[in-house]
Structures are given as C-alpha cells and as structure tokens.
Amino acid sequence: MRPIIGIIGSNDKMCTKKMYDFALELGDNLLSEGYRIITGGKGGVMEAVCSGGMNSQSYFEGSIIGVLPEDEKFGIVNLV
C-alpha cells in the first residue's frame, strides 16, 4: 500500500501564484514518487496539489483523498 501524505495550505484568497505553482509541482511529484495525497477539497493550495497529482503519470483513482471541512458542498473543487 502506498503511504499517504497530508497537504494543507492557503485558500483561494491567500494563495499566491508562487504558492499555487509550487503545490501543482508538489502534487505531481508526490504521486510520481509513490505516495497518495490527502487534502482539503476547496481552492488554493489544496486545489493545486490535487490538480498537480491528477496530471501525474502515476495518477490512479483513489490516489487523492479529499477531506471537506463542513457538510456544505459549495466551493468544492471537482478534483477530489
């Protein structure tokens, strides 16, 4: 079983382009190195790490797990 790495970070309003780009690369690299990702399901860093992971050659269904902070589905990215 692949180890799981948890990623949290700034939301849409506080996430800079530099942070977003870093998280995109991080998501791709983590999956490429044999990890799974668990993260929030909203925007910003958490969206970017999901997007980067989904673009990885190593992506498979279930390799990214989204944990949502509330019951409300408003604002959830469609990547988790």
Image (tube, grey):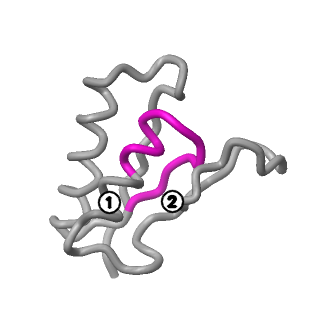
**CA distance for labels 2 and 1:** 10 Å
Residue 20 horizontal/vertical position (percent): 33, 33
Q: Is residue 59 left or right of residue 11?
A: left
Q: Is 60 rendered above or below residue 8?
A: below
Magenta stretch holds residue 42 = yes
- At a point 51% along the width and 59% down the height, the residue shown is 79
Residue 39 horizontal/vertical position (percent): 50, 50
Q: Residue furthest right?
A: 71
Residue 36 horizontal/vertical position (percent): 36, 66
Q: Quadrant of residue 57?
A: bottom left
User: Circle 1 — which element?
Assistant: helix
Say which residue label 2 marks.
79
Q: Quadrant of residue 66?
A: bottom right
Instruction: Give the quarter of the figure containing the N terminus.
Output: bottom left
- Sooner in the amino-acid sequence: mark 2 or mark 1: 1
Residue 48 horizontal/vertical position (percent): 38, 44
- At a point 47% along the width and 45% down the height, the residue shown is 47
Q: Quadrant of residue 64?
A: bottom left
User: Circle 2 — which element?
Assistant: loop
Q: Name the mark on residue 53.
A: 1
* Segment colored magenta: 37-49
Q: Is 1 rendered above or below residue 78?
A: below
Which amino acid type is shown beneath numbered disc 2?
Leu
- At a point 21% along the width and 46% down the height, the residue shown is 25
